[in-house]
Image (cartoon, rainbow, N blue to C red):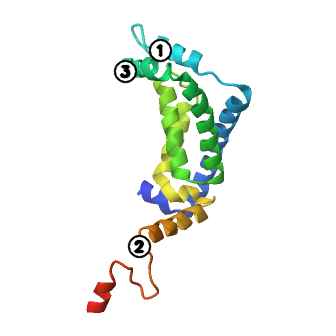
Amino acid sequence: MFNNWLRTNKWAMWFLTFIRVYIGYEWMVAGWGKLTGGFDAGGYLQGAIAKASGDHPAVQGWWAVFLENVALPGVNVFNFIVPLGEFLVGVGLILGTFTTFAALMGLVMNAAFLFSGTVSTNAQMLLLEVLIIVAAANAGKIGLDRWVLPYLRGLWNQWTNKSTRGDGTTPNNTWKKQTT
């Protein structure tokens, strides 16, 4: 019932727009600050790895192994993709373009930050992103998704030969129309 309300209700659409713009602003500002002010994830990654030891570690061992063996050696890649990803998620959510995908990528980043032992606003943002993802297209109706998604759907249908003809048939089911 709540899921249906999120996906179809006009009031939910406005509520989701408010949440979407708020979350988008938070992501965009964070990303822009890192893009323009310089960003080095090395210290953050080393700090997260250090939180994996002790009696009650804030970072799980399997995540620390990933950070130590993948993220830290590839810190230059992370120095590029984290700020760019944060900024693009923010722009996507503010403009309402590829809203569900942008929220999903924000959720992935928030989960990674939580796994790394940073609580901050990540848990709150993650929960709000879940609402946006569950709402799907309704979250982007007051945004560019209103026009972008139908346009892309039309292109996809043309590319896969699923376009509808004037008589209601498609190229793949014309024989059904002729036999009736």
Q: Quadrant of residue 121?
A: top right
Q: In which quarter of the image is the N terminus?
A: bottom left
Q: Specify which label sits upstream in the sequence, 3 or 1.
A: 1
Query: Where is mark 2, residue-wise?
Result: 162
Disc 3, SS: helix
Whole-percent x, y for residue 175 in the image: 29, 85
Query: Where is mark 1, residue-wise?
Result: 49
Q: Is 111 on the left-hand or right-hand side of 145?
A: left
Q: In this view, does 139 lie above or below 171?
A: above
Query: Where is mark 3, residue-wise?
Result: 62
Within 10 Å of the Cα at label 3, are there few (<14), some (14-19), or many (20+) other Cα atoms?
few
Q: Quadrant of the C terminus?
A: bottom left
Residue at the image point whose x is 38% and y is 17% from the top: 61
Whole-percent x, y for residue 102 in the image: 55, 46
Whole-percent x, y for residue 167 in the image: 43, 88
Q: Quadrant of residue 10?
A: bottom right
Q: Is residue 140 above or below residue 31?
A: below
Disc 1, SS: helix
Q: Specify which label sits upstream in the sequence, 3 or 2.
A: 3
Alpha carbon separation for disc pair 3 and 2:
45 Å
* Residue 180 visible in the picture: no
Residue 65's disc number: none
Q: Marks 3 and 2: which is nearer the front?
A: 2
Three-letter code, disc 1: Ile
Three-letter code, disc 3: Trp
Tag count: 3
Residue at the image point whose x is 41% and y is 22% from the top: 66
Q: Which of 126 and 107 is in front in this view?
A: 107
Residue at the image point whose x is 50% and y is 19% from the top: 72
* Residue 164 visible in the picture: yes
Alpha carbon separation for disc pair 3 and 1:
10 Å
